[in-house]
Image: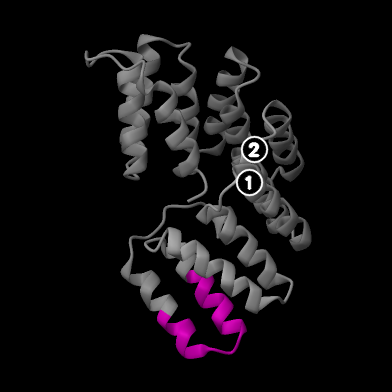
Amino acid sequence: MKILFILIMLAISISSAASAEDNTSAYWTLQGIDLSGQQKYEDALQAFDKALEINESYIAAWVGRSEALWHIGRYNESLTSSDKALKLDPNHVRAWIMRGVTLHGLGDFNGSDQAYDRAIEIDPAYGMAWNDKAWLYYKQDQYQKAVDYSDRAIRQLNKELAATLDTKAVALAKLGKNDEALQYIDKALDLTPEDSIVWIHKGDILKALGNQTGSDAAYAKAKELPEQVLDESSV
């Protein structure tokens, strides 16, 4: 859910470089991004590897490879790939975000926080870095900080994305502010009505509000939708 924004930005950044030929690093990287968007991460990994066989210095392929490896739970390899990208460009914001996401998956909250801070230092307006930082604090039970950072993400993005709204909603729920949390989760669902994780979060919030019928309906809706392929740190 949250990492999809990285994929979209990667695709935008390299689309103009893609060749009509089918054997360039740009071509194979775009193939990898497309396959990742379809949750075909093993196939995506092969595409990124082909891109790097052609040009081992192709940064977007290293970042995409990091993302694909993260999704299949190969966190140490994911970290190596993001670090390869950072050796090529120490100021690559999306590589720093992937480093933060991967360190989070490895349980290194301090290292993850430092990576997000570095991304924010390079580009303070990169809203998803603020959102990922919010989620990191949420997973450490620091819910008010999670709310504050999700608000910062919304301000920096100058728009409400489902990921930031969802983060704020679940943090508010942990603070016992379930009525307010429900408002934000509904806004998230207006933007991504097919996201099963957000429906599960809505079910949790309705259950906390004592609305068992609504909660059951939300959980049932989640089961009807494609399962989101996320690691345990994302739910």
Q: Which residues are magenta?
A: 200-217
Residue 65 percent coordinates (x, y): 45, 29
Residue 39 percent coordinates (x, y): 35, 45
Q: Quadrant of residue 100?
A: top right
- Looking at the image, which is closer to me, 227 or 150? 150
Name the residue at 62% across, 71% down: 181
- Looking at the image, which is closer to me, 228 or 169? 169
Magenta segment includes 56: no
Label drawn at residue 132: 1
**Residue at mark 1 to residue at mark 2: CA–CA distance:** 8 Å
Query: For this view, does 174 lie left or right of residue 47?
Result: right
Q: Quadrant of residue 225?
A: bottom left
Query: For this view, does 50 lie left or right of residue 12?
Result: left
- Looking at the image, which is closer to me, 22 or 108? 22
Residue occupied by mark 2: 100
Determine whether 19 is above or below 72 in the image. above
Amino acid type of the residue tagged 1 in the rendering = Asp
Kindly indicate whether the residue at mark 2 contacts the one at mark 1 (C-beta within 8 angstroms).
Answer: yes
Determine whether 3 is above or below 224 in the image. above
Name the residue at 58% across, 74% down: 182
Magenta segment includes 216: yes
- Callout 2: few (<14), some (14-19), or many (20+) C-alpha neighbours within 10 Å? many
Amino acid type of the residue tagged 2 in the rendering = Gly
Name the residue at 66% across, 72% down: 173
